Amino acid sequence: MSSPEAIFIRVVEAGGFKQAAQQLNMEPSTVSRKVAKLEQRLKAKLLNRSTAQTTPTELGKAYYQGLRRLLDEQDALEEEIFSNSKDVKGHLRIATTVDLGDTFIAPIVEQMLKLAPELSVELILGADIADLPRSNIDVAIRLGRIEDSEMYAKYLGEIPRVLTASPEYLKAHGTPKKISDLAQHHFVLYSQLQAKSDIQFQDGSHFPAAKIRSAIMANSLKSIAYFVKSGMGVNWGPRWLYEQDLQEGKLIELLPATPTENFTVTALYTTRQFLPYRVRWFLELLGERLELG
């Protein structure tokens, strides 16, 4: 990625010459000089330069958008025509949660690298990255359907959820027989967002967030599973996390006749007509893994 046009794109997406130089493994002075020559050739100012941040001018925005679209389409078209999994090259950057990364995505990365030895992959786990281009992220995997005018969201599949608690907890607090009984129970929650979300059931009913009582919150599924198995409360979480304990009787599924809604898994990436083959291949493999559970 050494052409003046490609360097200009990286400066816009990185937000500055220094950041772009770090990503390109170049000197900032070289990056600045190449962009300046591009502006001289076009006889137009493309960037507003300041010590705090570098932003595109109106002409620069239009030029960036056109260049980005052309380069994306060129890369994707060449990969479509000339590539298969053994020929995939380049660097794939994936952002997601720690739990999704460890459970679903890490095995896919292993599979891709074994089949495509010239591909490199970077997993960025735990950070909720909003600006994918500036962070140089190819694709972000999120739970839930996402509406964003700046990004394209693709539905990939679903992860079943279950309400569960330990036998010891239920012995002490009773087993709920209907949805409204949940108001008498303590919950172990994943985040503030879960605390503010109704518990949704597949039949359309729900348990309101305002009635959820909780004294424990953790953003790690491993910690949540520990608390639930220790008898600290009820959790509404992914079935895969509890499947073995449910089968062994170490945990009990609550309200099994009224199953809860699933997690929706969504891929988020910059809107473009063509996706590079390495991204499409990754999304296909992830979709297949989600179908298998």
Image (spheres, rainbow, N blue to C red):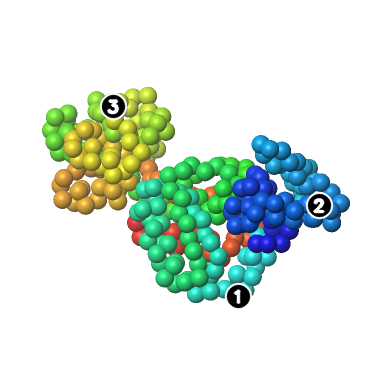
Residue 215's disc is: 3
For marks 3 and 1, give the CA distance.
Answer: 56 Å
Do the residues under discs 3 and 2 have CB atoms within 8 angstroms? no
Task: Residue at 75% x, 53% y: name it.
Answer: 33
Q: Name the residue beneath numbered marker 2.
A: 39
- Counting from the top left corner in percent of width and height, residue 269 is at 57, 51
Quadrant location, the N terminus: bottom right
Front residue of this view, candidates 115 and 17: 17
- Sequence-wise, the earlier of marks 3 and 2 is 2
Task: Residue at 52% x, 59% y: name it.
Answer: 92
Q: Secondary structure at mark 3?
A: strand
Front residue of this view, candidates 254 and 81: 81
Q: Residues within 10 Å of mark 3 (few under 14, many from 20)?
A: few
Let me know if residue 132 appears in the view: no
Front residue of this view, candidates 162 and 19: 19
Q: In the rendered structure, which amino acid carries the disc numbered 2?
A: Glu
Q: In the rendered structure, which amino acid carries the disc numbered 1?
A: Phe
Residue 160, placed above or below residue 278: above
Residue 285, placed above or below residue 189: below
For marks 3 and 2, give the CA distance.
Answer: 58 Å
Q: Is residue 201 left or right of residue 173?
A: right
Q: Is residue 53 left or right of residue 194?
A: right
Q: Name the residue beneath numbered marker 1.
A: 82
Task: Residue at 75% x, 41% y: name it.
Answer: 48
- Counting from the top left corner in percent of width and height, residue 156 is at 47, 54
